[in-house]
């Protein structure tokens, strides 16, 4: 199907007007900070130090997940960072995610309790369903409604402030909203200059759903092994280098500012102190409208989705979206 059909279908959901929906989040300093610190691929050996450093540098938004396998170390970093900065738990927005093997509603609370224990927290600001895919006994299938209903029940406790989703297609998001009492507060998905997903982001604005963009540096992430037809690394793209030089910023900062300028929060990851500081410095990097237009145009030549495990899962993901 064409994207516009999905897009119109999702936008139509905005008229549902269910009074039981959780209030949509407006991105402000008092809710989810635009600039976050990601923990995907942080090695256990330095995850604690990196997270503590990030908090000391000034980050107030941490993105975690069960499948990252480092939440105990991240939790130690949170405790150390809070201690060294004098911050309260309520000063930091912390997100984690439900993994595919706990989509059975009977297992949802167990997954949440394990995450809270590993992170050393009493509550999460946001808990996302990592994928619309459930895994059981080595089998994968599209499976999200019952798991979401389990998350809704947890949302009624003091363990969660907000619930949301990640990596959903338009049709899946529409289905979930129409068959639930709670609308997702946040949707996290891949978005960067090579995969802008502008119409999809616009649909979320209409629905009142906040967007968090992962992989803001696109194929700079070493997890995405380069292919023959892949575009140049985003942070060495000639247009990005030129804009960075003109504005006195780094290409990483330019990529982050572009993402935040669209109203999406961004969650770069690094284990190196200099890069942690560099990324935080994006808050002082100023771009002009012409710069943003120039970055927008990159996808016309290099449209590319880098994170698509459809083959591995044996299910179709991102149907109706760019480069699905």
Image (tube, rainbow, N blue to C red):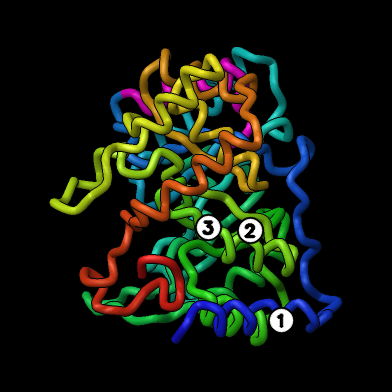
The residue pinned by badge 2 equals 186
At numbered mark 2, what does the secondary structure look like: helix, strand or loop? Answer: strand
Q: Residues within 10 Å of mark 3 (few under 14, many from 20)?
A: many
The residue pinned by badge 3 equals 112
The segment highlighted magenta reads 46-61
- For marks 3 and 1, the one nearer the N-term is 1
Residue nearest the observer in this picture, 35 or 235 = 235
Identify which residue is drawn at 39% across, 81% down: 142
Give the Cα separation between the discs numbered 2 and 1.
16 Å
Residue 72 seen by the camera: yes
- For marks 2 and 1, the one nearer the N-term is 1
The quarter of the picture where the N terminus appears is bottom left
Q: Quadrant of residue 8?
A: bottom right
Q: Residue 227: give x, y in percent of width and height.
A: 16, 51
Identify which residue is drawn at 29% across, 25% down: 45
- For marks 3 and 2, the one nearer the N-term is 3
Residue 203 is one of the magenta-drawn residues: no
Disc number placed over residue 13 in the picture, else none? 1
Residue 48 is one of the magenta-drawn residues: yes
Residue 110 seen by the camera: no
Q: Residues within 10 Å of mark 1 (few under 14, many from 20)?
A: some
Give the mark toward the camera: 3 or 2. Answer: 2
Identify which residue is drawn at 67% across, 37% down: 33
């Amino acid at each position: 199907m064409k994207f516009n059909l999905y897009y119109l279908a999702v936008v139509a959901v905005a008229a549902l007007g269910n009074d039981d929906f959780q209030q949509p989040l407006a991105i402000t300093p008092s809710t989810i900070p635009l600039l976050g610190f990601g923990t995907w691929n942080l090695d256990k050996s330095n995850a604690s130090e990196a997270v503590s450093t990030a908090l000391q540098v000034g980050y107030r938004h941490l993105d975690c997940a069960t499948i990252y396998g480092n939440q105990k170390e991240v939790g130690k970093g949170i405790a150390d960072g809070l201690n060294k900065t004098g911050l309260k738990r309520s000063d930091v927005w912390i997100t984690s995610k439900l993994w595919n093997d706990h989509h059975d509603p009977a297992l949802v609370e167990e997954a949440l309790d394990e995450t809270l224990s590993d992170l050393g927290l009493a509550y999460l600001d946001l808990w996302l369903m990592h994928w619309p895919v459930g895994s059981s006994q080595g089998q994968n299938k599209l499976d999200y409604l019952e798991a979401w209903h389990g998350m809704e029940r947890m949302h009624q406790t003091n363990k969660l402030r907000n619930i949301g989703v990640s990596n959903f297609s338009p049709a899946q998001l529409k289905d979930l909203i129409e068959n639930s009492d709670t609308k997702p507060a946040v949707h996290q998905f891949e978005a960067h200059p090579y995969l802008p997903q502008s119409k999809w982001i616009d649909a979320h604005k209409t629905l009142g759903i906040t967007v968090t963009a992962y992989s803001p540096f696109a194929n700079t992430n070493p997890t995405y092994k380069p292919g023959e037809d892949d575009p140049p690394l985003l942070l060495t793209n000639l247009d990005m280098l030129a804009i960075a030089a003109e504005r006195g910023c780094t290409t990483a900062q330019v990529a982050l500012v572009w993402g935040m300028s669209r109203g999406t929060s961004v969650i770069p990851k690094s284990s190196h102190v200099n890069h942690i500081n560099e990324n935080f410095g994006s808050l002082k990097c100023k771009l002009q409208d012409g710069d943003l237009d120039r970055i927008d145009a990159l996808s016309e030549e290099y449209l590319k989705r880098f994170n698509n495990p459809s083959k591995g899962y044996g299910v179709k993901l991102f149907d109706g979206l760019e480069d699905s």
